[in-house]
Amino acid sequence: MSTAFASVADVIDAPFRRAGHSEFPFGADALSLQTLRDMRPGVEQVEVAFENATVYREVSEPKPKLAQEKIHQIRDYTHSEQIVGNSPELRRMLELVDRVAPTDSTVLIAGETGTGKELVAHAIHRRSPRGDRALVKVNCAALPAELIASELFGHEKGAFTGALQQRIGRFEAANGGTIFLDEIAELSPEIQVLLLRVLQEKEFERVGGNRTIKTDVRVIAASNKDLQREVNVGRFRMDLFYRLNVFPVHVPPLRERVNDIPLLVDYFAARLAARTGKKINQIEKRSLSAMQQYSWPGNIRELQNVIERCVILADSEVLRVDPGMMQEAAPVPIAANVIAFGSERRAHIEAVLRETRGKVYGPHGAASRLGLPATTLDSQIRALRINKHQYK
């Protein structure tokens, strides 16, 4: 579809550029100029969504290929990317990876914990024109809230207590390459604003600095949470979500690719046996059947752990799995969980934060008083939605 306007926002801008003209595009003459101005922010969001849909359609549109060529490409992934399997679900995902990799589009990888989102990010980077440059990985959940801006964007000497010298941030280190932002949903609202600017303007300042730094970085983000749901409940910015969700890739959980389990077991058993100096030639059929019937809540990571234990315990060339290794944890009643970790825990943490004036880190911080690693306390503070800044 083509129009006389370059973008959706141009439709709103047109009346302002034609001052005194009575005709408005698409019959909009019934709207006042103020109404059109009020509409503009929403229209810009719609424009980003349209751009994302266009990119996704262009990139993911099937190209003519022989079936044998598709199979061969996926087998290449098995060897070079450590992505093992040949199920239809995995093949569909890898076809999307193959199409988006040569572009410079932002990719949002969604999937449960342990499904291999980082391997998918590696595959996209290595098969892109930036593949010979740096892939900088950032686990957003592991970084302390007080230091995440410095980690991402760097800081100048003297920017804060302990900043004894200038430091280059992850975005600056990834210039010309790719940055992988894992667990993106864990970013605080303040950092979400800074990240949005980088995605929109391709520029940032170091903490404590006033020099604008241009950046040429491809962004790949990942989350085990439903970001659309996080937007709906107000924990994630809608505008940032649209900037990240240019090309979504869903990594299927292991329970949806049961036919890949024999291949994965063989792959992990061979590698782990070689590492431990053992020889595994066969897998007991009963054990394999049990593994294919199990739901694997921890996905591939859990499967790898089970196989590692089996290899360590193996006293022959046949791999056997103890059914006790695959017992799903009994669900904790929600009401009890809320009482145990909800109101009582929240009150206790808030009381300590009040005493430390919101300080988490250091020998006199709340983490030290509670006997917890500071990163663990930070995670609990975010989970309980405590505003530690109100106690400063």
Image (cartoon, rainbow, N blue to C red):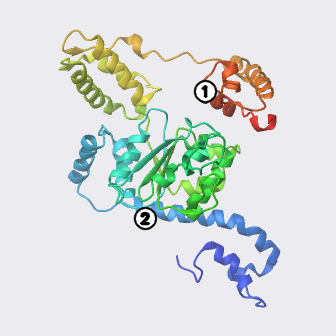
Say whether residue 225 is visible. Answer: yes
* Amino acid type shown at disc 2: Glu
Q: Residue at x 20, y 17 (%)?
A: 278
The image shows residue 290, relative to residue 264, as above or below, that is above
Of residues 136 and 75, the one nearer the viewer is 136
The image shows residue 17, relative to residue 376, as above or below, that is below
**Residue 272 percent across, percent down from the top left:** 27, 23
The mark found on residue 58 in the picture is 2
Q: Residue at x 21, y 51 (%)?
A: 68
The mark found on residue 376 in the picture is 1
Dot 2 crowding, Cα within 10 Å, few <14, some 14–19, many 20+: few
Of residues 307 and 368, the one nearer the viewer is 368
Dot 1 crowding, Cα within 10 Å, few <14, some 14–19, many 20+: some
* Amino acid type shown at disc 1: Thr
Q: Residue at x 30, y 30 (%)?
A: 264
Q: Residue at x 24, y 44 (%)?
A: 75
